[in-house]
Image: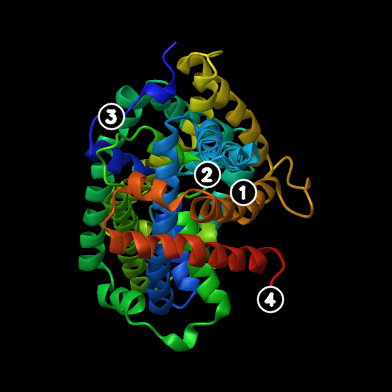
Amino acid sequence: MAGASHAHWSSRWAFIMAAVGSAVGLGNIWKFPYEANAGGGGAFVMVYLAFVFLIGTPLLVAELSLGRRGQLSPIRSMEKVAKEEGRANWWSLVGWSGVIGSFIVISFYSVVGGWTLSYVLEALTGGMSGITKEAAEAHFNGMVTDPITPLFWHAGFMAITVGIVLRGVEGGLEKAVTVLMPALFVLLVGLVIYSGVTGDFMAAVNFLFAPDWSKMNADVALNALGQSFFSLSLALGSIMVYGSYLTKDVKIGKAAVTIAAADSAVAILAGLAIFPIVFAFGLTVSKEEGLVFMTLPIAFGQMTGGALIGTLFFGLLTVAAITSSISLLEPSVSYLEETGKMSRKKATFTIGVAAFILGSFSSLGFGELSDFTIFGKSIIGFKSYITNNLMMPLAGMFMAIFVGWFISRKGMMEELAMEEKWFRIWFFMIKFICPVAILIVFYNIVFGF
């Protein structure tokens, strides 16, 4: 049986599109603007960008290098590299954390992806026309608390994801991302132009790029660091498994910078597409999901051509969600496939169905199971907490420690083939700066200051 370890990207372009697609998701297009808004705008953006390139990019290089050297799923890659370096087998727990974490995330990510699908239809059919603040909130709350409707869209979104992943690397992942990612950029740039013409564009530019450092404090800085870390899709196995499909001729360092730059560009463009509309209509953002599902529909309902713009915007969100969801499904599928006990088709359907079932509880947690809590958190809140706040920071920290302290410096130099001056800078960052930075974020998340 041909395992996932034998597959390779057909070109550097395909890999870049896949990796950018993994990194670019709902978090870039609506979580980043929300975090920027909560963090005071420009100061948050400047610190976020600094962290992306000083912390996130070195980690991206490390994860890709582990995947390419292992040429297997995250679990097997960590086992293989640890064995080659004469290290303990328990380092494979970093791979296990990524595979389990990505499975948990896709189970609730697809629920939110389903919401975006439903809002495409809502905008297309004119359901947002003239909608008021109260009506927008009532519609969203009514949709997510309904026991059937969100499950239908959750199933539809998962079916799209499964349909792409079961076709394999070249036949599924590549074909999807090489079409969807350019489409995403075109849609996003088009929305920025539209917002620039019809909205308060200069207010948005000043908000995003004129930093007010009086707004900066420890909490805002830590939020920016956390957002930069999570926005690159690190420590969930996705980047490592995509790295396992890389050939040796690809320069990982240059590829990582390209991926980080594209990921950041999407976040900035999202802000330039959203804030001109928010400012022009005098809207406010009270909570994270409110920005997209409650605030913007009000503007779309009032503006000329709002039905078309709303459809394009939620279509953009759906594309971003799909490019991330396929990368979240891939680590589990690749592991099951390479065991030799399942074909790719069977592995994909197995993981897809299991994720749908687990995700159904997340969906019902807004309605029928709203009174059910785990350690005081809703079902989706608990899943998000253990993955974003515990598993990802810990796995990222141990991955940096493993690469910086337990792999030979010579071996890393050969794998990365960087110029010596750039390698020295990267090695210092991954060995000292990244673990400490992640530890600070982790401590703040769990214990607070």
Estimate the spatial distance between the alpha carbons at disc 1 and disc 4, rounded to whole Å: 21 Å
First of labels 2, 4 by sequence position: 2
- The residue at which mark 4 appears reads as 449
* Residue type, numbered disc 1: Thr
In which quadrant is the C terminus drawn? bottom right
* Amino acid at pointer 3: Lys
Say whether residue 32 is visible. no
Q: Secondary structure at mark 3?
A: helix
Q: Position of residue 328 (x, y in %)?
A: 49, 37
Instruction: Please tell me which of labels 1 and 4 falls first in the chain.
Output: 1
Q: Which residue is located at x 34 percent, y 46 percent?
A: 414
Q: What is the number of the mark on residue 387?
A: 1
Q: Which mark is residue 236?
A: 2
Label of residue 255 in the image = none
For marks 1 and 3, give the CA distance: 29 Å
**Residue sitting at the far top:** 1
Label 4 to label 3, Cα distance in Å?
A: 46 Å
Disc number lying in front (2 or 3):
2
Camera-side mark, 4 or 3: 4
